[in-house]
Image (cartoon, rainbow, N blue to C red):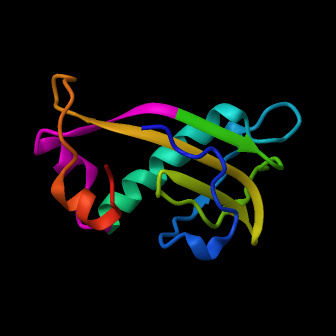
Amino acid sequence: MRLSLDPSTDAADYGFVHRIRTRFAETDAMGIIHHGAYAPYLEEARAALLRHAGHAYDEVRLGGIDFSVLELYVRYRRPLRFDEVVTRTTFQVAYLLQVEGETRSTAVTVHGAVDLSGRPARMPGWLVERFGAA
């Protein structure tokens, strides 16, 4: 499944919000958050969304399913800087990262369900029901 690489920048389109404070250790020499720090931000937001949905990721894994990242796309619109609070990250397979209402980045991830041995598996029914995952 290939997703649109143009996620919405309208905060109203996202039903889940997770706050992340940027850390000094993630900055480069210019004081800007290094591009490599974005993937953990997205991962933290996905785990928080699953917890919010009543299915903590560790419980999902104990049930024999893992969500392998198949693709990751990030569009950098404006840099994140040290000690900013990213007030909106989301998991709809599309992400909107904002600081004080200003769009800083958008991202898209594609996930496939795999069993704990890494073989393809069906998406859990609760995930399909709640989020329309294919």
Q: Nearer the viewer, residue 30 or 71?
A: 71
Residue at figure coordinates x 46%, y 50% from the top left: 44
Residue at figure coordinates x 65%, y 61% from the top left: 8
Q: Residue furthest left?
A: 63
What is the total number of numbered labels drawn onto the structure image? 0
Residue 75 image offset from top left, x and y in percent: 72, 42
Judge whether residue 78 is colored magenta. Answer: no
In the rendered view, does 79 fall on the left or right side of 62? right
Residue 94 image offset from top left, x and y in percent: 54, 53
Q: Nearer the viewer, residue 67 or 123?
A: 123
In the rendered view, does 59 fall on the left or right side of 56? left
Residue 30 image offset from top left, x and y in percent: 89, 36
Q: Quadrant of residue 103?
A: bottom right
In the rendered view, does 117 fall on the left or right side of 90? left
In the rendered view, does 104 fall on the left or right side of 94? right
In this picture, is 105 found above or below 2?
below
Residue 26 image offset from top left, x and y in percent: 68, 38
In this picture, is 118 found above or below 121?
above
Residue at figure coordinates x 61%, y 65% from the top left: 88
Q: Residue furthest right?
A: 30
In this picture, is 42 found above or below 112?
below
Judge whether residue 61 is colored magenta. Answer: yes
Quadrant including the N terminus:
top left
Residue at figure coordinates x 33%, y 60% from the top left: 132
Q: Nearer the viewer, residue 96 or 2?
A: 2
Q: Quadrant of residue 97?
A: bottom right
- The range drawn in magenta is 53-71
